[in-house]
Image (cartoon, rainbow, N blue to C red):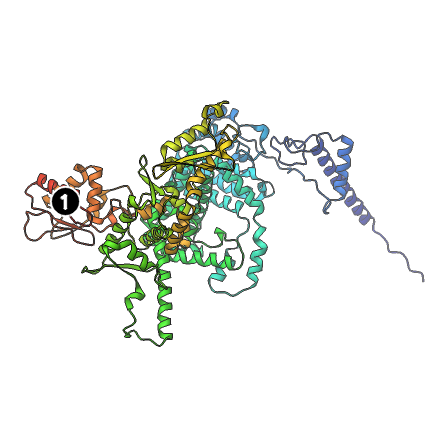
Amino acid sequence: MESQPPQVEKSDVNEEKKLIEDKKQRAKKIVTQVFCQLTKGCGREFCTNKDCASNKMKFKDRNLTEKEALKIAIQFVKTMGSDSNKIKLCPSATIPKTIQIEELAQLSEATKEDFEKRFLEVFSSPFTLSFSFLKDREIYLKTDTHNIDFDKLSEFYKIFDAKFDEEERLKLFTTAGENFVDSFKKESKDIEEPWILRSFLINFENPDLMSPSFESIIDRIAYMLESQLNKKNIDSHLKEVLQGSDQEFIMEELKEDMTVHETYKIQSDILVYWLSKLDKERFLDHIRKFQNILSINIFNESFNSENVLEFLDTLESQESRAFIRLLSLLDIYHGANVNKEPEDQINYLEFNNDGFNKEMCLDVDLGGHYEVWVRAMNFCDRNDVPFRKYEVTTFCNYPWLLDTTAKGEIMMTEAKIYMQQMADEELANIFIQGLSSQNPGINNADMIYLQFKVRRDFIIEDTLNNLIREGINLKKQLKVEFEGELGQDEGGVQKEFFQILVRDLFKPEYTMFNYFKDSKLVWFNGETFESNIKFELIGVLMGLAIYNGVILDIHFPVACYKKLLNIEPTLDDIKELDPSTGKSLQYILDCDSPTLQDDLYMTFIYEYEVFGENKTEALKENGANIFVSQENKQEYVELLIDFIFNRSIENQFEAFSRGFHKACGGDALTLFRPEELQKLICGSQKLDFEAMMKETRYDGFEGEEEVLNWFWDILIDELNEEQQKKFLFFCTGCAKAPVSGLESIGFIIVKNGEDDEKLPCAQTCFNLLLLPNYSNKERLKQALLLAIENSEGFGMI
């Protein structure tokens, strides 16, 4: 019996026809959509799709005919889902209308309900918010400017503030923030474009961010910005290594990830550029908002500061994540501040957080942070992987947050670690050689201290001889003994040693330095006859002073500390060192006269004085025959700066720098700004005796006696600044305060015996020479002035 073909149900045929028809209709709809998109556009005011005619800036097919558009649309449908499908479709969802300048008057008159509706529509969408408050709608996709009309934006926030109280505003921003996060995910393709960053700047302008109630709002914004700029994080890789895991595959993954951030680095660079163009006042306002929220975090009871290193590293709590996001946000602003023109930069101290440095640092193990930071950098260096901040959490990644005192503490930690390593090595050598601690040839003190024995009259020569000893370790605590003098060095002898050595090395007869009368600063003399070893000695001296907590009376300009940190000096440094020369150079740069060459009649020659004789130096080849003009004046200024700060003193500064880094070179040094390094070495000009008074201890006094009131009244209110400096010099051997302030010097006032008719004896870590009797406040003042006017420091008259 012949087999019969299978019977096809009529209903199945109809269903298949229906599917085919539906497919045709969908294809027709897409063809129509693509055709209209290429010819008429999607209709959005701010379309970002380069394949849409509504994109006023980037659509490339303006001359496309309808026939060509139809052909492209049909081809698009045929290749849907394949690699050849390159047309991007505009979203079908309706996007709310943006807020522009002309709507502000209308919003001002709107009801609360209508205003609330418009606010939520716009601030709930990163896309819509990014194209609101534009200065120029015709260039909405350009990224060489943020294009935000901040004046009109401020006007909007004022209207907003007038219509709602703080609680209502907080509720609205909370709702908008939640919607913002959701929209961020839905608009993921669009947010890969840099212009989305405008939405963050608009939010940062909100004056309510200064309120503690808005802490969660700014954290949400910071979270979205962090996710935008750091799409992939490899924290876990480095943490595993730091915790001792031995996984070789980690290195390969790290190396593969090196280019992951290229796209988002572009966005980060654009944001930094936009921020660098913000006016100074607005930029500072942003910084203070974030610092305010950061301080709220620090003083939050739920913020556990007992072990901040562990607290930050585990990232388990909401508070720690919020804290780190704020640090990352401020780090972006710090980078922008560095990129600003010098006159537009805000003071670097604005990035120091007082709450952190004065409160939290008391509990923070900064030494632990330093050790983790160094291990991470060494790990990356050994394995040829760039060190990136997000790989490990430590405050050393954010040196702008730390003040000079905190950085000094980190440097001391570095010194202690190095000292301990050296001590361990020396002990190991002793045992290897079979020597015991009782061996008379072994001086245990030599293992712990760097010991110098010097003669007062030959202090430079003896110090040099001490420094050239074989195997000397400069990173030990210094102990000094003056030959033929009794007494152990408990700090005072060491300070006196530094004081005398600095005084002798900077004597004019050594001709090692040139003195600039107007600025009262000194600079290296490239024409000196003194050997470079003495310049190296000064470098070592400065390094030793840092590690031994001694303030030096040295008057170098900031340019010196820039060069020690491998930062090139600028015209501002010339202005500091030699104001008249700096003023002249600035005039040349500012002058726009077409006859500048004839007016100046200057060539590329620098004239200066050497030992009373005039000398000239060509700043470039054939410089005597090249006149300074409008075309080459910038080159002239740059070459002159280079000659003064580099070429003319190359050998002397190289020796000085070698000595400095020999004594205190290390990773901790890179945390410092030039101004901070100067402050660490030379102390602070600010003398806050009221702060010192609050921390002063009394021995033999209750602290309320009349004589003490006289003493403080005289010191704080009646002595001028110069006399106050002499008093400080009398007590400490230095006329400047340590970086931690006068309150940190441990000032003590001791009752001078049983006779109340004698001036109290003031001391830091040593006794001062007793002063004459007094009978009233005026006699006390005269006695004090007599002592400090004739003092050479350390209470010596």
Count how many numbered circles sit on residues in the image. Answer: 1
Q: For this view, does 596 lie left or right of residue 32?
A: left
Where is residue 320 shown, x and y percent of the image? 42, 51
Q: Neighbour class for label 1 at 10 Å: few (<14), some, many (≥20)?
A: many
Q: Is residue 238 above or below residue 644?
A: below
Q: Residue at x 51, y 60 (%)?
A: 382
Name of the residue lying farthest toward the right: 1
Is the N terminus in the top left, top right, bottom left or bottom right quadrant?
bottom right
In the figure, residue 62 lies in which quadrant?
Answer: top right
Q: Nearer the viewer, residue 675 or 127?
A: 675
**SS at badge 1:** helix
Name of the residue lying farthest toward the bottom: 434
Give the residue number, with chain letter if any, for mark 1.
787
Q: Residue at x 31, y 75 (%)?
A: 436
Q: Residue at x 7, y 46 (%)?
A: 773
Q: For this view, does 750 lie left or right of residue 234?
A: left
Q: Residue at x 67, y 39 (%)?
A: 89
Amino acid under disc 1: Ala
Q: Nearer the viewer, residue 83 or 627?
A: 627
Where is residue 612 shown, x and y percent of the image? 34, 37
